[in-house]
Amino acid sequence: MNNENNDMRVYVVNLLETSQERKRKIALLHYELEHPARTSEDEMISAMALGHGAGSGSSHSDGHISDKTLYIALNYQNRADKLNADIKQEIVVQLVELEREQKRLDYYISLLNERQAKAIQFFYEKELTQGEVKKLMGLSAKTVRKLKKEALDALVVMYEFISDFS
């Protein structure tokens, strides 16, 4: 096995081993996009514009909002909106990359023959031991090892083929 082939094998095994963590991150990022933690504009303006209380030594009467305070609140609102948009953009960029990587892996696994795909699923998605996979698939330990190796080899070939176009 040449060094380049070995590097690709390490890469593929790493993708498989980190698949569950990647799926969790994707789910978390989707949640954050759907439920952003942010303060509404009305809450922010109210908090800043009406921040003066009676007895605070202010020369303004109760309920009076100075133009300066309102300007600061609106400026803060604009900055908060930009910050929220920037955070959302960062989430989207990371989400797109993680989903692209996971979808490619899932698709390549779907191109394996049924037994190879099942072996990969048992070893990496369900994190089963060789003995557990042997029992579930009704195969000998040697056949399970061979099946896993063949599946990994096939995935490496797919990733190497596509890397030639990158």
Image: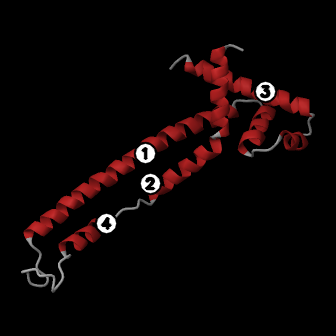
Query: How far is the residue under mark 2 from the one under mark 4?
Result: 15 Å
* Quarter holding residue 103: top right
Examine the rendering and report whether any part of residue 158 can be seen.
no
* Quarter holding residue 108: top right
Q: Earlier in the sequence, mark 1 or mark 4?
A: 4
Does residue 75 lie above or below 121 as drawn?
below
Q: From this viewpoint, which residue is outermost toward the front?
A: 57
As drawn, the label of residue 149 is 3
Q: Secondary structure at mark 1?
A: helix
Question: Which residue has dot 2 on it?
Answer: 33
Query: How far is the residue under mark 2 from the one under mark 3?
Result: 39 Å
Query: How far is the residue under mark 3 from the one under mark 1?
Result: 36 Å
112 vs 24, left or right, is right
31 vs 21, left or right, is left
Q: Secondary structure at mark 2?
A: helix
Is mark 2 in CB contact (under 8 Å) with mark 4?
no
Is mark 2 in CB contact (under 8 Å) with mark 1?
yes
As drawn, the label of residue 113 is none
Question: Which residue has dot 4 on it?
Answer: 40
* Closer mark to the observer between disc 3 and disc 1: 3
Q: Give percent across and percent down for residue 85.
A: 32, 51
Question: Which residue has dot 1 on it?
Answer: 92
* Closer mark to the observer between disc 2 and disc 3: 3
